[in-house]
């Protein structure tokens, strides 16, 4: 059994019992299109992704403007916010210390998947 725990005043745990949490089910882990990556670097801290975090990535999801993606640009992997403006694709860093990347038309560019969740171990 899983219990919800209030972060304010204490409450009896038995009042909040729910079915067991299954993180694999919650994140779709085990589906053929889902994989995990460890976050490296600090360019996405503004979206809550910090070095060492584990990101859940679904390669079956199509990127939408504003979602976080794992992409390969000219052989280099990166995790950024995907912005589409007309025919232009921008990979936006979510930390002002890092530049955004405008993807040139002639670039070898692929979105490998959309980030659907993350976990942090303390």
Image (tube, rainbow, N blue to C red):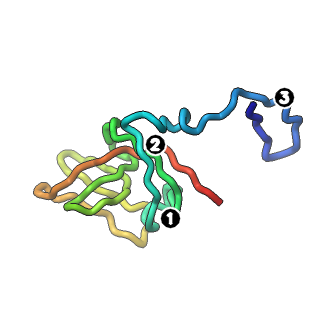
Tell me residue 94's x, y (percent).
43, 61
Please name the residue shown 33% across and 50% down the image: 82
Please name the residue shown 31% across and 37% down the image: 62
Q: Which residue is mark 3?
A: 15
Tell me residue 37's x, y (percent).
43, 53
Please name the residue shown 50% across and 45% down the image: 117
- How far is mark 3 from mark 1, CA to CA? 37 Å
First-in-chain label (3 vs 1): 3
Q: Which residue is mark 2?
A: 116
Left or right: 42, with 9 as reference point: left
- How far is mark 2 from mark 3, CA to CA? 30 Å
Q: Nearer the viewer, residue 94 or 32?
A: 32
Please name the residue shown 87% across and 44% down the image: 9
Tell me residue 8's x, y (percent).
82, 46
Query: Residue 51 has which mark?
Result: 1
Left or right: 3, with 68 as reference point: right
State the image quarter where residue 3 is shown: top right
Q: Nearer the viewer, residue 67 or 55?
A: 55
User: From the viewer's perspective, is residue 108 above or below residue 116?
Assistant: below
- How far is mark 2 from mark 1, CA to CA? 17 Å
Q: Quadrant of the N terminus?
A: top right
Q: Nearer the viewer, residue 31 or 118?
A: 31
Do the CB atoms of the residues marked 2 and 3 lie less than 8 Å apart? no
Mark 2 closeness class: few <14, some 14–19, many ≥20 residues within 10 Å: some
Query: Residue 99 has which mark?
Result: none
User: From the viewer's perspective, is residue 23 above or below residue 121?
Assistant: above
- Find numbered disc 1 in the image and state the secondary structure of the residue it sits on: loop
């Amino acid at each position: 059994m899983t219990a919800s725990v209030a972060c304010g005043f204490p409450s009896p745990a038995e009042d909040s019992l729910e079915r067991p949490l299954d993180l694999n089910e919650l994140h779709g882990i085990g589906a053929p299109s889902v994989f995990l990556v460890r976050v490296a670097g600090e360019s996405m801290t503004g979206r809550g992704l910090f070095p060492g975090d584990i990101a859940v990535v679904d390669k079956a999801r199509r990127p939408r403007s504003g979602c976080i993606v794992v992409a390969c640009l000219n052989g280099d992997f990166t995790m950024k916010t995907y912005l589409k403006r007309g025919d232009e694709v921008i990979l936006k860093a979510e930390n002002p210390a890092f530049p955004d990347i405008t993807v040139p038309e002639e670039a070898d560019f692929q979105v490998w998947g959309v980030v659907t969740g993350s976990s942090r171990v303390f």
